[in-house]
Amino acid sequence: MKKIQFITIGFFLIFLSNVTSSWAKNEDNVVSSAEKVVSRWEEMLSQDINLLCYHRGKAVWYVEVVHLIPGSMSFDVEKMSSIVTPYRLTVSFIINSKENLYSPNANGEDKFGFKNKEDAFNHMKENDFRFFPPGVSTPKIESEIQYSLHELRCYYAFQKGSWVLIYGDDTFESKIGRCLFIDENFHYFIDLFEIPVE
């Protein structure tokens, strides 16, 4: 009887060891695949991207130029209790951005933004990107850099062998998230919505 018990315990320990090893290997693959997600964001943001944006409140269009701050990319993988989503990935990065909402050539309501997409894209000279309307500009403001810094976070869920973009924090949504599905921007993000783990 004792011999059978020892054999049973032995098989259980071997099984447990194999399962633990498999879990560890799977987690290594998950972390490695998370680095792939970060690399894709870094590659996309490493050059200036011109996002066409729509201001719902004023019903106007404008362009936001976004650029990644080098070395600011980071990520964190969190193990979840869900069977459907066993892991969550947080991708963090810092961008600088500028908008032509306050362009001196703005033709939207109250000289804010542009009435159509074409006008927004046609006014992208340096003077079109300002922090304040022309009427309240001062010599000091005119000399300030026209980019502003923003720290963003977006979140991925690990589902069915892929990282799936689910949402971002408020800053991500205001700077990038609301522009994701505008036709003119879609080519920037098409490879970022769902990234399979190989």
Image: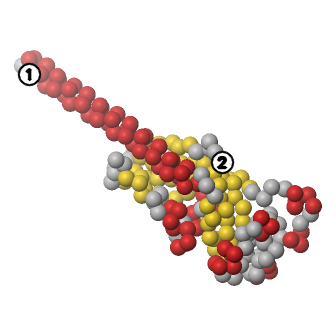
Q: Residues within 10 Å of mark 1 (few under 14, many from 20)?
A: few
Closest to the camera, between mark 1 and mark 2, is 2
Q: Mark 1: which amino acid? A: Ile
Residue at position x 75%, y 57% in the image: 147
Q: Quadrant of residue 71?
A: top right
Which of the 4 image quarters holds residue 109? bottom right
**Viewed as shown, does residue 132 lie left or right of 167?**
right
- Looking at the image, the residue that sits furthest to the left is 1
Residue 186 image point, x, y percent:
51, 67
Residue farthest along the right direction in this orientation? 139
Q: Residue at x 80, y 63 (%)?
A: 131
Q: Hey, what amino acid is under mark 2?
A: Ile
Report the residue marked by disc 2.
69
Q: What residue is rendered at 6% in x and 19% in y?
A: 1
Does residue 18 sit above or below 98 in this rendering?
above
Residue wearing tag 1:
4
Label total for image: 2
Residue 135 placement: quadrant: bottom right
Residue 175: x and y, percent?
64, 61
| Residue situated furthest top in the rendering | 2
Mark 1 vs 2: CB contact within 8 A: no
Of the numbered discs in the image, which one, if any, rests on residue 37? none
